[in-house]
Amino acid sequence: MGRRNIPEVSAGSMADIAFLLLIFFLVTTTFEVDSGITRKLPPIPPPGQVPPIIKQKNLFTVLVNKNNDLLVEEEVMQLKDLRQATIDFLDNGGGTNEIGEPCNYCQGKKDETSSDHPNKAIISVRNDRETEYKTFISVQNELVGAYNFLRNRESMKINGQKYTTIDSLYNDPKLKDGSPEKDALSKKLKKIQDMYPLKISEAENVKN
Amino acid sequence: MSKFKKKKSGELPPVSTAAMPDIVFMLLFFFMTVTTFKKDDYKVRQNLAFADQVQTLNKDDKVIYIYAGKPSQRYQDDFGTQAKIQLNDKFADVSEIKDYWFNEINNNPKLGQQYQNVAITALKVDGETNMGLISDIKQELREINALKINYTTKKGEFSKNYKK
């Protein structure tokens, strides 16, 4: 009856339009993932607070001068040796912690002159104002690397899984806050963190 | 003769291009979904340092960015070659960081007042910046109790930092 023929829309140019869009998105795409070394800054101490006295042997001092040279525990050191030196220091376990327990999981040399317990060991990094940022990052990277090495080792013994693996599972955005899985992971992490607490102090810069 | 000619009977059939739009659309959707638009234009050099002991920031983390480094080539005539801080898309002074931080946390639709204690400040700093500037930034952040920071790096061994 009144049926009219609807003219067919040509789909021939669809590919061209899609190509245009495709090229636009191809050009604008950046596969950028933000990742980096996460750190917590120390809060500003209330006025009048006296800093606690730390035994020299529990302090691992890393100085970086303006020529980006390293002075570790009064000795010149190359950046590539820093990680092992840090591991040796943290894992020494020559004494006892605050409540008098020896470090029964440490595998270090038990040297009297080095750190007592990973719990007490503190790393102090001091930079010159003219130190380059990439040196600072490299030093931080090696120090965190030393901690991760020790934490991974203990975590493999206890959980059969690397600390860093558990940590990335814990930080997965798909895992909801308060879910039992997340709590379980958090407990595992806490246990390892208590064995090797991250104590890196970034003191104010030295001026020269 | 005719025996051989027989083989050359049909011509090559033309390749059908009917499936091309489908393929193109597939690619299109892929790139559409993975595209993230850059938030700010960098006015400072961003040759980030390398590190391998890194943690990844997730998309729904509450992140405030601070950029620092030498001004890029085309801004060097106006701003010199000394390392500078960039907040949003402007060069800024160290003293402006506090205002910027609170302004971001209160007014950025992705953030909000309630996230003040969990917000992470990402420092995107060029590898050749002096540490003096960084410690000034850190000091400012400590004063406003913005203690969670992330030194944004590229993934790689630290020895790559020293390759020419």
Image: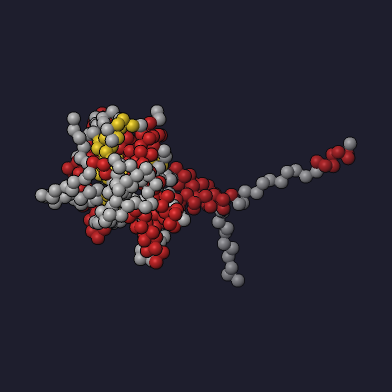
The one nearer the camera, A95 or A14, is: A95
What number of labels is visible?
Answer: 0
Q: Check the image and name the residue furthest to the left.
A: A48
Answer with left or right where residue A119 lies relative to residue A23: left
Quadrant in the picture for residue A132: top left
Quadrant in the picture for residue A54: top left
Give how far across and how far down residue B17 sits, in percent: 62, 48
Q: Which residue is at a point 44% across and 42% down the rendered structure image?
A: A27
Q: Which residue is at a point 26% across and 56% down the rendered structure image?
A: A99
Q: Which residue is at a point 37% across and 42% down the rendered structure image?
A: A109
Give how far across and how far down residue A36 sits, in percent: 35, 45
Answer with left or right where residue A47 lies relative to residue A40: left
Q: Which residue is at a point 41% across and 60% down the rendered structure image?
A: A174
- Residue A143 in view here: no
Give how far across and how far down residue A87 sits, in percent: 36, 42
Q: Quadrant of the N terminus of chain B?
A: top right
Q: Check the image and name the residue furthest to the bottom.
A: A1
Q: How is the image coloured?
A: secondary structure
The one nearer the camera, B33 or B81, is: B81
Quadrant in the picture for residue A89: top left
Up-down relation of residue B2 to residue A33 (above or below): above
